[in-house]
């Protein structure tokens, strides 16, 4: 027993309170600003000394040096950052992406990995039974319709996707008629539990003399239901569920999972009143009267489950599919062209996850056929648990699909990828996803997620659609490009001004610019151009090039900027000297 911060929720709260890391752009701008600042100080001191040596006017020399320092620093950069990021947020909001922080917009542009849930994000979140495999049509339909937690609220059917899928399947197969022919009354319910991986409903049916039979209806993970069954119903003919028949059923389960179907098994049992009352009559040794209501309920469910869920009669399988979103397939293809790795994380069976990943394009279409030719691309939660940090670190970048993964393991996945220098985006919707979203370079919460998840995330996708994330990345890259455009322009003019003043100070000519002129040029160069360059649209190839990983201004770009600055300086000084030689009175005007 634990309380406060020692509980699971308490530990989650502690994990999401960690200090936030700087965004990639913040780091790059900081480095660039530091370099420009140091260079500006050196140049200004040099110009001050030369100017003072020639003119012996300390005030004029100081004003020129300070004005040059102001001109050398791109003051328009903060305005460009704020303007472009704010406009980016506005555009993304119209596309169902709500960004909570300005810096998150540009982080998306640098994203190299997207770790995403499957259900509802890559798929439509509309479970439907695609392939029923019922050994008993009538009893299979009855179990599908009666053994679930769906309910009507305001004339709307409410329930989890799997229950809704099985219930709609039952309705499409004469469930109402079959139910009307029987006199069922619900006696007890053992809800689905992630540890038990099954649910059970107990119904009674009375005859004309009010003698009751009790039906144990169970639905859950196929491997477990097969193990709990010792008979099989072939449309009313009850046979022993021998090993050969079980192997046949397991082959069918394997076939269905390889077709990206989520498989649930159906089974039942029939007992008389005496047997039911024997199990239901819980004495004080089984459940203490002093226990809390919650503990009593848990104990009763455990007792009933162990007592009733045995010697079951197998009735069939339901192959349920949550079809992939058509736009998600295209979006994943766009990510791959853009050099972004998409990793699918799901709680589904490994084979189901593999089949869906192949259909989405995360794994090659021929993965099953040529699995040996590819690096290990799939990892289960148990396999991840068994790996040491060193072992996992070696293969982390090869993994494309995680199956049967617990929410708590997502944080480890992100940490290892970040240790490789990757910029990781993570999606989630549950409370347990909050630490992973907080740890990610950019956490993305689903609109249908919990309040805790949304609070921990940097961005909220209102339509739970993977394509929305990709369009946000496109916007982030556009913003990054616009900032680089502004810097190229601004640094070119700054270098031109610095070289003009510096070279002019070394030549036997008057200073080309007065301090006021330098400040005026700085205002003109930092204002309107900054705004116009910050509003540029995306390039056509913006999603066909790898993410930005290097410096904001690399050596090649810096060389081009320097050449442009030199050309400006030569042109300015050439015109200045030409006019000076022609005897123009005050050429500075």
Image: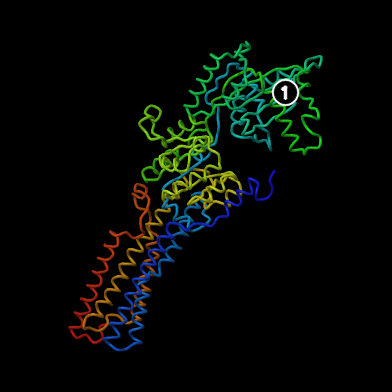
Figure quadrant of residue 431: top right
Q: Nearer the viewer, residue 181 or 255?
A: 255
Q: Residue at x 38, y 50 (%)?
A: 547
Residue 370 percent coordinates (x, y): 37, 28
Residue 159 percent coordinates (x, y): 64, 35
Residue 535 percent coordinates (x, y): 40, 60
Q: Nearer the viewer, residue 240 or 387?
A: 387
Question: Is residue 43 left or right of 460 when viewed as pictured?
Answer: left
Question: Is residue 280 left or right of 497 when viewed as pictured?
Answer: right
Quarter of the figure with the N terminus: top right
Q: Residue at x 26, y 62 (%)?
A: 560
Is 394 drawn above or below residue 172 in the view shown?
below
Question: Is residue 147 left or right of 86 when viewed as pictured?
Answer: right
Quarter of the figure with the C terminus: bottom left
Coloring basis for residues: rainbow
| Badge 1: residue crowd in 10 Å (few <14, some 14–19, many ≥20) | many
Q: Secondary structure at mark 1?
A: strand
Figure quadrant of residue 226: top right
Report the residue marked by disc 1.
203
């Amino acid at each position: 027993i634990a309380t406060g911060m020692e509980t699971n929720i308490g530990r989650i709260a502690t994990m999401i309170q960690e200090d936030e890391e700087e965004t990639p752009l913040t780091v790059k701008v900081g480095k660039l600003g530091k370099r420009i600042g140091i260079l500006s100080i050196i140049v200004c001191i040099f110009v001050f000394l030369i100017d003072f040596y020639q003119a012996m006017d300390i005030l004029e020399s100081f004003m020129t040096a300070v004005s040059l320092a102001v001109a050398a620093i791109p003051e328009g950069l903060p305005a460009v950052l704020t303007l472009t990021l704010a406009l980016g947020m506005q555009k993304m909001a119209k596309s169902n992406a709500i960004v909570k922080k300005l810096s998150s917009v540009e982080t998306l542009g640098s994203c190299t990995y997207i770790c995403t849930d499957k259900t509802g994000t890559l798929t439509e979140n509309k479970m439907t039974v695609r392939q029923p495999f019922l050994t008993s049509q009538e009893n299979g339909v009855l179990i599908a319709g009666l053994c679930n937690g769906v309910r009507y609220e305001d004339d709307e059917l409410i329930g989890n996707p799997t229950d809704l899928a099985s219930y709609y399947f039952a309705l499409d197969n004469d469930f109402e008629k079959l139910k009307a022919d029987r006199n069922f009354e619900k006696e007890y319910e053992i809800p689905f539990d992630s540890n038990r991986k099954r649910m059970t409903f107990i119904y009674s049916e009375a005859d004309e003399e009010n003698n009751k039979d009790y039906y144990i209806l169970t639905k859950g993970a196929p491997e477990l239901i097969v193990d709990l069954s010792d008979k099989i119903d072939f449309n009313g003919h009850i046979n022993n569920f021998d090993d050969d028949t079980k192997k046949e059923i397991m082959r069918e389960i394997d076939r269905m999972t390889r077709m990206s179907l989520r498989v649930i098994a159906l089974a039942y049992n029939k007992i008389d009143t005496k047997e039911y009352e024997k199990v239901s009559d819980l004495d004080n040794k089984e459940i203490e009267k002093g226990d809390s209501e919650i503990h009593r309920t848990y104990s009763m469910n455990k007792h009933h489950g162990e007592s009733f869920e045995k010697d079951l009669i197998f009735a069939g399988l339901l192959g349920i599919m949550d079809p992939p979103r058509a736009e998600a397939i295209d979006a994943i293809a766009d990510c791959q062209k853009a050099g972004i790795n998409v990793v699918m994380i799901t709680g589904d069976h490994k084979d189901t996850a593999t089949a869906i990943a192949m259909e989405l394009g995360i794994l090659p279409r021929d993965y099953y056929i040529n699995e040996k030719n590819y690096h290990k691309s799939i990892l289960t939660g148990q396999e991840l648990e068994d790996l040491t940090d060193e072992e996992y670190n070696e293969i982390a970048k090869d993994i494309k699909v995680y199956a049967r993964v617990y929410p708590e393991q997502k944080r480890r996945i992100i940490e290892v990828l970040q240790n490789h220098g990757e910029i990781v985006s993570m999606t989630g919707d549950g409370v347990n996803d909050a630490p992973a979203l907080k740890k990610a370079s950019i956490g993305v919460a689903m609109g249908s997620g919990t309040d805790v998840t949304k609070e921990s995330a940097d961005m909220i996708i209102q339509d739970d659609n993977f394509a929305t994330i990709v369009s946000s990345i496109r916007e982030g890259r556009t913003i990054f490009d616009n900032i680089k455009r502004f810097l190229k322009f601004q640094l070119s003019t700054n270098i031109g001004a610095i070289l003009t003043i510096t070279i002019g100070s070394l030549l036997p000519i008057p200073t080309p610019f007065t301090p006021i002129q330098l400040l005026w040029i700085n205002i003109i160069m930092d204002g309107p151009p900054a705004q116009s360059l910050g509003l540029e649209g995306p390039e056509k190839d913006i999603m066909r090039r790898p993410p930005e990983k290097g410096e904001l201004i690399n050596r090649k770009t810096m060389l081009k900027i320097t050449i442009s600055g030199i050309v400006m300086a030569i042109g300015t000084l050439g015109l200045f000297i030409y006019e000076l030689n022609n005897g123009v009175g005050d050429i500075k005007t």
